[in-house]
Amino acid sequence: MNASHLKDRIRAGIVTPDSKRDYVQSLFGRIAGRYDLTNDVISAGLHRRWKRLVLELADVRPEHVVLDLAAGTGDLALRAARKRTAGLLIAGDLTVEMMRHGRTRGGADAVSWLACDAMRLPLADASVDRVVIGYGLRNFPDLDQSIGEIRRVTRPGGRVVSLDFGRAEPEWLDRTYVSYLEVSTSVAGWLLHRDVESYRYIPESLRTYPAQRGVAELMQRHGFVHCGSVDLLFGTMAVNFADVPA
């Protein structure tokens, strides 16, 4: 399949919320076994440092209920578990295969695993203190609805912190960055999964993702306060954060 046909296939798969939900679930199900290795390869291990920043900004405390949403293999939840900083850790994800792999990792027994859709979270109103997300917002079928759900389940005084790909500035740097992603993700997908499409999805998903500035605006519209972001690598990665009014 040539590059043009591959782009068309991916874009067709994520054109509506329902089709994107099915596409993302299938894609991550295929790559679950080597997902953590691929993150190390693509980021040269830097995602570990960025995830530490997520947990630092989340300011997790012993009495907190923490939801690692779009948890995948539970990386953020397991990191928090090792620090023993939270009262209850929940790792929630749409893809069962990812969580099945996560349950084989060290410390998995300290985490409650929850199959869930970010657009319809099976949690009570104001039931969690912290929501942490690692590379998840960009994959939600309906970002606006999902942020509304996150706001619903987060308690007054709670906080949301999310790490994801961003958009660089100035424009020429962003174009270079996206071109690099198209090549590097194709190579990583083929070498690690024999599946170019599995990671070529990343640059295609960025085309409709509002990135760090747009996410901060969406959070503000849903009633979050102190909304902002920290740019990493000239904005090619970013950590968004927001609080629920106390």
Image (cartoon, rainbow, N blue to C red):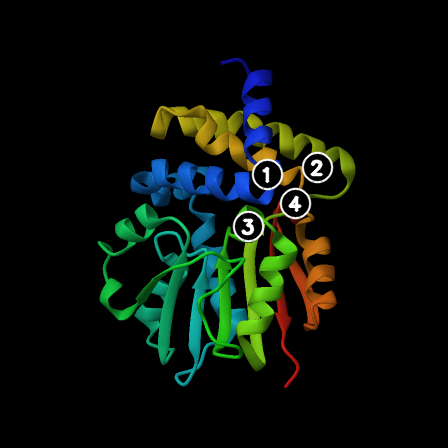
Which residue position is annotated with label 2? 174
- The x and y percentages for residue 10 are 55, 29
Which residue position is annotated with label 3? 140
C-alpha gap between disc 1 and disc 4 = 6 Å
Extreme residue toward the top, this view: 2
* Tag 1–tag 4 contact (CB < 8 Å): yes
Q: Crowding near pointer 4: few (<14 within 10 Å), some, many (20+)?
A: some
Compare marks 3 and 4 and give the one earlier in the sequence.
3
Compare marks 2 and 1 and give the one earlier in the sequence.
2
Residue 50 shown left or right of residue 112 in the figure = right
* Tag 2–tag 1 contact (CB < 8 Å): no
Give the structural element (helix, strand or loop) at label 4. loop
Residue 114 shown left or right of residue 145 in the figure = left
Q: Crowding near pointer 3: few (<14 within 10 Å), some, many (20+)?
A: many
Q: Residue at x 43, y 64 (%)?
A: 68
C-alpha gap between disc 4 and disc 2 = 14 Å
- The x and y percentages for residue 226 are 70, 73
**Residue 209: which numbered mark, if any?**
4
Q: Residue at x 43, y 73 (%)?
A: 66
Compare marks 4 and 2 and give the one earlier in the sequence.
2
Which of 242 and 54 lies nearest the eye of the viewer? 242
Give the structural element (helix, strand or loop) at label 3. loop
C-alpha gap between disc 3 and disc 4 = 10 Å
Q: Crowding near pointer 1: few (<14 within 10 Å), some, many (20+)?
A: some
**Residue 205: which numbered mark, if any?**
1
